[in-house]
Amino acid sequence: MSLFRDDGIVLRTQKLGEADRIITFLTRQHGQVRAVARGVRRTKSKFGARLEPFSHVDVQFFSRGSDLVGRTLPLCTQVETIAPYGARIVDDYTRYTAGTAMLETAERFAENEGQPAVQQYLLLVGALRTLAAGTHQAHLVLDAFLLRSLAVNGYGASFTDCARCGLPGPNRFFSLQAGGVLCGDCRVPGSAVPSPETLVLLGALLSGDWQTADGCEPRYWREGSGLVAAYLQWHLERGIRSMRYVEK
């Protein structure tokens, strides 16, 4: 039996019995952790409100050695709030749907419980901080998070140089299976031909060039969001259910 402590983002909650919940966290050191929080559905719970989705918390777990591989779930014994991002996200539909898609994506990429996912954790913390601050449009923050999550998990897309031969861009053709834009010689059947401005936007979101991204016209970010969603689904081999509710 042991205690361990970590920082984490609450990804999801599930009811357990009459008063408990199973909380899914993405933590800095332990990756995805599922733990039981006893009594948090009672009105007198000391930390029930701290264990809601989007919350950034410092949490202490009580485990029995093999808990992180799923035999017996650890218990949440202490929770302290680091940043209550949910308070600034859930009251705005656009932010809420974008944030929910981020949480589900992070959970998919870090679904091996107990395995470190530090880059994914840091990306999620930064994205939720930006989303809650409202400094950029929610759909742009979401697309930037999705592109960067794909990149840190080995599925980075190229939006300038040819993804096959490396020919310097700009290149016009975009292929999901090839990993980004292709030149005329490497073009494969079924390649899309997005607007050059759309490719510039996606490259800006991936690199963090917010000045370019914020100045993009709506017709280009709509096209870009479609490409990002398709690229994500291709590499995850299944869709993100909450994406259907994202307000475009």
Image (cartoon, rainbow, N blue to C red):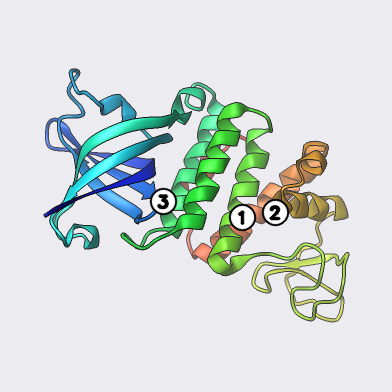
Earlier residue among tags 2 and 3: 3
Q: Secondary structure at mark 1?
A: helix
Q: Secondary structure at mark 3?
A: loop
Q: What is the crowding at mark 2: few (fewer than 14 residues within 10 Å), some, or many (at least 20)?
A: many
Looking at the picture, how far across and down is residue 103, in whole percent?
45, 44
Residues at marks 2 and 1 touching, judged by CB atoms closer than 8 Å: yes
Residues at marks 3 and 1 touching, judged by CB atoms closer than 8 Å: no
The nearer-to-camera label among 2 and 3 is: 3
Q: Which residue is mark 3?
A: 28
Q: CA distance from mark 3 to mark 1?
A: 17 Å
Earlier residue among tags 3 and 1: 3
* Viewer-closest of 233 and 152: 152
Is any atom of residue 6 visible in this view?
A: yes
**Amino acid type, residue under disc 1 in the picture:** Arg
Check the image and report above or below for 88 versus 32: above
Q: CA distance from mark 2 to mark 1?
A: 6 Å
| Left or right: 90 as drawn, with respect to 157 | left
**Amino acid type, residue under disc 3 in the picture:** Arg
Q: Which residue is mark 2?
A: 206
Q: Which residue occupies 39% across, 49% down?
A: 26
Q: Which residue occupies 70% across, 53% down?
A: 206
| Left or right: 212 as drawn, with respect to 95 | right
**Amino acid type, residue under disc 2 in the picture:** Leu
| Left or right: 242 as drawn, with respect to 163 | left
* Viewer-closest of 232 and 84: 84
Q: Secondary structure at mark 2?
A: helix
- The circle on residue 148 is 1
| Left or right: 137 as drawn, with respect to 78 | right
Q: What is the crowding at mark 1: few (fewer than 14 residues within 10 Å), some, or many (at least 20)?
A: many
